[in-house]
Image (cartoon, helix red, strand yellow):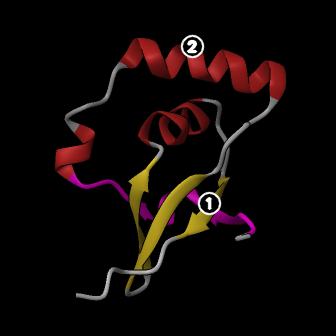
Amino acid sequence: MMKPVPIKLEEIYVPAKLRATLDAAKVAALAEAILAEGLQSPIQVRRDGARFVLVTGLHRLEACRSLGEKTIPALLVLPRVH
């Protein structure tokens, strides 16, 4: 099983297509849950040169950002091989 690694929020790129699905109410609710219980599930990212590209977890990422976190636990996803 893969183990989450801490990744700096500033190193994570969010594609525009993903960002379009952002729901501020969901982010606020998640931020409250994270304060109460901690982050329950890591986000998923893939490497793209020196940065990471978000695969899943937009609302968790933005909730952590809104709480002033500097890093977030993430699973590194390998690129698909065609």
Vertical order, 18 against 1 (above or below): above
Quadrant where the N terminus sits is bottom right
Earlier sequence position, callout 1 versus callout 2? 2
Please give the range of residues in magenta.
3-15
Question: 77 or 9: nearer the eye?
Answer: 77
Quadrant where the C terminus sits is bottom left
What x and y, as percent, mark residue 68? 64, 37
Q: How many discs appear?
A: 2
Residue 58 is inside the magenta segment? no
Please tell me how crowded label 2 is: few (under 14), some (14-19), or many (20+) other residues with Cα within 10 Å.
few
Q: Quadrant of residue 74?
A: bottom right
What x and y, as percent, mark residue 66? 55, 30
Vertical order, 7 against 18 (above or below): below
**Mark on residue 29?**
2
Left or right of 7, for residue 35: right
What x and y, as percent, mark residue 22? 31, 29
User: In the structure shown, which secondary structural element does the residue marked by tag 2 occupy?
Assistant: helix
Left or right of 11, for residue 82: left
